[in-house]
Image (cartoon, rainbow, N blue to C red):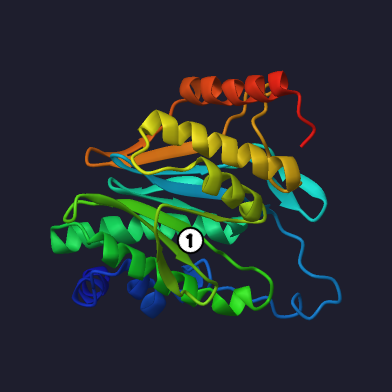
Amino acid sequence: MQESTANQVAANATSSFTEHLQRDRPELLPFGRSLTGIASAAAPVQVPHATTIVAMSYNDGVLMAGDRRATMGNIIASRHIEKVFPADRFSVLGIAGTAGIAIDLTRLFQVELEHYEKIEGTQLSLEGKANRLGAMIRGNLPMALQGLAVVPLFAGFDTGANVGRLFSYDVTGGRYEEHEHHTVGSGSVFARGALKKLWRPRLTAAEALSVAVESLYDAADDDSATGGPDTVRQLWPVVYTVDRTGARRVPDSELSAASRSVIESRTIAGREA
């Protein structure tokens, strides 16, 4: 009986792990849940939300950074949340929106890419990865319409074109390729203003890191849902770079130096705004 079940699962296997779950175990999907009875309540569902993510191209690839704060209404739900993750060797994913669903969707996306590589014997193209992420976000649309939206930012190194690329999404799964830089989350309008002034073509990785920290600092300065560098708790943004050698998490030692440099320069300047 067990052998027959195993053979049936193998016969139905596809290169998409998400399709497999949708067919055989839909209740395991991050968006395969019901809010019946909860969504109709007078008050909206209070769950932790994640903000803010910034991404940009630089001379050798792409960089993505996220602050560490999650909020639940006017409450700080967490000061330690991580919002940027490696999707696979050559791509990274940043999450904004409903934190729990976003983290589960990230894990599913990681398994999706690993599953494809094992079944097909090759990596999915960056374009294909971006499309599959869009399909996952589209699957969450019923939850998004009930206030539990997930809006990620995706970046990676296109090994075929030998260039870093950025992709943004809307809650319907619409996918849009961005150029130079982009931001998502409640602090994105302030971070984008900083990026427009500080970003320039052919930045080095170190310069891109400094620009990312500056933009997140500006977002935290005006958006209460975004957390700035915390020198007391030694909490720094989560930052990944992706180039032709793969994804690399920037160590805390580099983040500490970049963050303290920003804080010191602003302290010396003594400006109010």
State which quarter of the image contains the N terminus.
bottom left
Instruction: Give the residue at x 58% y 35%.
Output: 214
Residue placed most toward the observer, 102 or 64: 64
Q: Can residue 239 be seen?
A: yes
The quadrant in which residue 208 appears is: top left
| Relative depth, front residue between 27 and 108 | 108
State the residue position of label 1: 105
Q: Is residue 69 visible?
A: no
Of residue 176 and residue 83, the one placed in the foreground of this image is 176
At 22% from the left and 61% from the top, the residue drawn is: 124
Vertical placement of residue 134 versus 216, above or below: below
Q: Position of residue 150 (x, y in %)?
A: 56, 64
- For residue 182, side relative to residue 18 (left or right): right
Q: Is residue 113 above or below residue 20?
A: above
- Taking the image as shown, residue 272 lies to the left or right of residue 125, namely right
Give the position of the C terminus as an image quadrant: top right
Give the percent coordinates (x, y) of residue 111: 35, 57
